[in-house]
Image (tube, grey):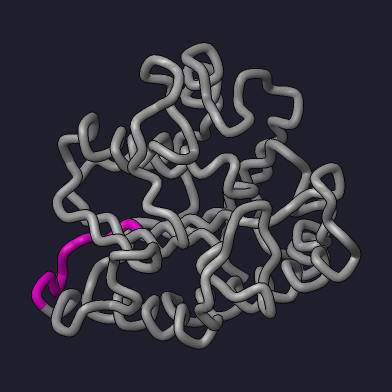
Amino acid sequence: MKDVLITDFSGSLEAEGFLSWLHERGASVTHLDWTGLEGTNCYCDEAAQAQILALLPESLPRLRWIDTGDYHYMSHLLALRETDPFHLVLLDHHPDNQEPAFGGVLSCGGWVKALREENPLVRDILTIGPEGCPQALPDGWAAERKGERVYISLDKDILSRSFARTDWSQGEHTPAQVCGMLEALIGPMKLAAIDICGGITPEKGATPEDLRLNRETDIALYQFLSGLYL
């Protein structure tokens, strides 16, 4: 079983049963329980950022679940731990490059813009999934960067509602399409890390069927990725 990092703000992964599934199978889980941390829901204020960065362990697993899409800004904060140049590939139904609504506060909808402006190690940023962006990995993109490092961020809202349920609008991709892109990236390139977000909590209206679907998809992604880069 591969080591996995869980950054837990909402309890969504526990509610769907993915966290208990990992424990039952003996996975090495670094579970950071931040459910009581203020200033983190959709926006991450400066005080919360400082706490998060101070509490992150020295060594981080490359495989990461970072809660629902409301906390996608964790991709930016986790990428601050990178010490070598990397390319970002974002698989998402939204570009996450908006201007912040509140005076420069890091947000789930603007973290890509913050990453581009604040992290000098970022090389290319490839976004797949939103309207106006590629819907698949462009031919030759990974091959042209063979041996270079890639940080992948996957929001499950890129998936059809037949496979995942989130609290944001969703795309129409299938898990097979997403896994095909992941394999095409990780094959020629060096994986720096991959983080996964997306889901919905019972507090936001998740039904038992929503939670079951999300659990099944998270398990499938974990098993696929564990085999892909052993």
Would you place residue 69 above or below residue 214 in this image?
above
Quarter of the picture containing the N terminus is bottom right
- The answer to if 149 sits in the magenta stretch is yes
* For residue 218, above or below residue 36: below
Position in image of residue 125 (x %, y %) = 22, 55
Is residue 33 highlighted in magenta?
no
Residue toward you, 134 or 24: 134
State left or right for residue 21 relative to residue 105. Answer: right
The residue at 47%/45% (across/down) is: 60
Q: Magenta residues, as a range? A: 144-151
Judge from the rendering whether residue 18 lies leftward or rightward of residue 104; answer left or right: right
Q: Residue at x 67, y 73 (%)?
A: 161
In the rendered image, the residue lying farthest to the right is 208
Query: In the rendered image, which quarter is residue 127 located in?
Result: bottom left
Furthest toward the top, the residue is 47
State the image coordinates of residue 28 (x, y, percent, origin top left). 65, 57
In the foreground, 202 or 87: 202
Residue drawn at (58%, 48%) of the image:
69
Instruction: Tell me the quadrant of the picture where the C terminus can be found.
Output: bottom left
Q: Quadrant of residue 131?
A: bottom left
Q: Pinpoint residue 172: horizontal percent, then vertical percent.
A: 53, 77
For image coordinates 88% across by 61% down, the residue present is 207
Q: Whole-percent x and y of residue 179?
A: 46, 81
Left or right of residue 108: residue 166: right
As rendered, which of 87 and 134 lies closer to the eye?
134
